[in-house]
Amino acid sequence: MTSVLAPAMVPEALTSNTAVSNYGHNRTNGTSTNHSGALPHQVVTTSISIPRSITMDATDPSMTGESLSYPEDLCPPDNFNMVTTWIYRSSFPKKKNFSFLKKLGLKSILTLILEDYPDQNMKFLKENNVTLFQFGIAGNKEPFVQIPDDKISAALAVLLDRRNHPILIHCNKGKHRTGCLIGCLRKLQQWSHTSIFDEYRRFSHPKSRSMDQQFIELFDSREAWKVIDPKWIPEWKTLGHHAGV
C-alpha cells in the first residue's frame, strides 16, 4: 500500500512501477482490459465479482447507496455508486464498510479530505494493497474558499490512468467535493451541462451548492488534458477525440 499526498501539479507522464516524489506510485494492471465511458441514461455494468444487487447505474435516480438493500455483511458507504466502469464514488468509508470494499477489488482510493487518513483505514489499505491518493481540498464556500483547478486536474489524471483501476473517490459525505470532481470528469466524457448538474444535485441533495455548479461549468478541461497521460487513459470512445488518441 502506498500513501500519497498530492501537490498542486502532476508530472508530465506517469511511469509504471515507479514511485513519483510527492505524487504517487502507479502500477500496471498486467492485463489489457476494455473500458467504456458512461454516457447519460446509459446502463453501466461491471465484471467485478460482486453480487448483482450491488452493481449499479450512476444515471438511475433510484440507485444510490442509501436506498438499496444489501446482505448483512456487505454494507456500502453512504452515497455509494458506480460512476463508470472501474470507478466508484462514496462518502468516507467506515470500518463497517470494509467487507463491501474488499468485494470491489480496489487498487486505489482517491480522497479529497484535508485531514490525515485514520489509522484503521490505513490498516485496511495496507492489508489489501490499495494505493491512497490524497488531494486535500476545501469545499466551495462563499465568500473566499474555492476548489483549486490544478488539484482537480491532477485528480483527473489519476482517475484517467487505468493502472489505478478499480478506484474509489470520496470526501466526507460524498456530495460536494466528490460531486465537483465527478462533474469535471463528465466534462471530459462530453456530457451536457444539464446531465452533469442533474447528477450533481441528485448526490448532493438536499444541499446543492450553486458555487459547485459554477465551478464545474467554468472548469477548463483543456488544462486537465495537459497532465493526463494518453497512453494510459481508459478505452472510452467519449475520451478519444479530445485526448488526441
Image (spheres, rainbow, N blue to C red):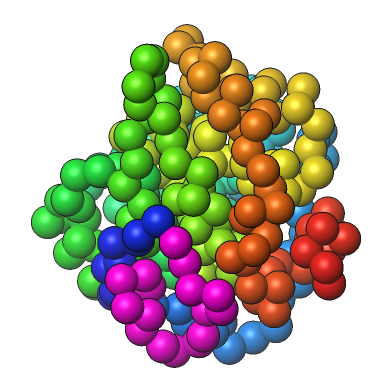
Picture quarter containing residue 240?
bottom right
Residue drawn where x is 31% and y is 47% of the image? 136
Give whichever of 140, 108 is nearer the camera: 140
Residue 19 is inside the magenta segment: yes
Residue 156 percent location from the top left of the image: 56, 55
Q: In this view of the protein, can residue 76 be seen by the observer?
A: no
Residue located 65% across and 32% down the image: 218
Does 177 appear in magenta? no
Give the quarter of the image for residue 40.
Answer: top right
Residue drawn at (77%, 68%) of the image: 235
Pinpoint residue 13: horizontal percent, then vertical percent: 56, 78
Q: Main secondary structure of the magenta part?
A: loop
Q: Check the picture and name the quadrant holding the C terminus.
A: bottom right
Please give the name of the residue rendered at 31% of the width and 71% of the height, measured from the top-left corner: 22
Quarter location, residue 143 = top left
Q: Can you give x and y, in whole percent of width and height, for residue 123 in the image?
A: 17, 64
Q: Horizontally, is 153 left or right of 79 in the view?
A: right
**Residue sticking out furthest to the left:** 119
Query: In the visual, does 138 lie left or right of 104?
Result: left
Quarter of the image where the N terminus is located: bottom left
User: Start and end of the magenta stretch?
Assistant: 9-24
Residue 33 visible (yes or no): yes
Say above or below: 232 vs 5: below
Q: Residue furthest top?
A: 206
Left or right of 209, for residue 43: right
Q: Determine whether, in the image, residue 46 is placed left or right of residue 159.
A: right
